[in-house]
Image (cartoon, rainbow, N blue to C red):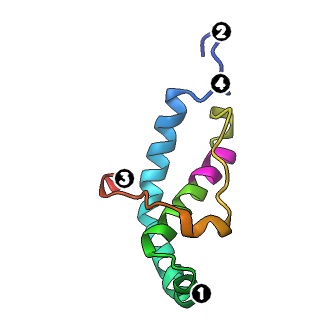
Amino acid sequence: MTPGHDVRGNSGFGWLVFLMIRGLLLWLMVPVSTVGWLLAFFPLHRRRVSLGQFLGWVDLNFAALLTRSVLRPLFRSPPLWVPLRALPQVVHRIDLLDFM
């Protein structure tokens, strides 16, 4: 570590570690979240929440969880939590390239 290096900043290294961890855990998060969406299908369907919106919401909150817990020292300003009431406004974010 070099003197004057700000470990708490949103560094390129922090984003690289974040993307590696997120990419690996998406393989677990997407199937588990899909089962969760199926179990809560009727309440979510009444609120007009699609599977893509639900997965996007889970991914946004998962990113907030990672940057506020395990990767906290690497991020000065982690993303905000997305509340459950904002679920119908979430735009689908998970792409096939996220798994590679």
Circle 1: element type:
helix
Please name the residue shown 43% across and 55% down the image.
Answer: 24
The three-letter code of the residue at mark 3 reads Asp
The three-letter code of the residue at mark 4 reads Val
The magenta segment is 63-69
Please name the residue shown 49% across and 28% down the image.
Answer: 12
Does 46 sit above or below residue 52?
below
Which labelled disc corresponds to residue 3? 2
Residue 54 x/y as whole percent: 51, 70
The three-letter code of the residue at mark 2 reads Pro
Pointers 3 and 2 in contact (C-beta within 8 Å)? no
- The dominant secondary structure in magenta is helix
Image quadrant where residue 82 sits: bottom right
Per the model, the C-alpha gap separating discs 3 and 1 is 28 Å
Which labelled disc corresponds to residue 98? 3
| Residue 50 falls left or right of residue 5 | left
Of pointers 3 and 1, the one earlier in the residue sequence: 1
**Who is closer to the viewer here, 80 or 14?**
80
**Who is closer to the viewer here, 48 or 56?**
48
Residue 1 x/y as whole percent: 60, 16
Q: Nearer the viewer, mark 3 or mark 1?
A: 1
| Residue 76 falls left or right of residue 98 | right
Of pointers 3 and 4, the one earlier in the residue sequence: 4
Circle 2: element type:
loop
Residue annotated with mark 1: 43
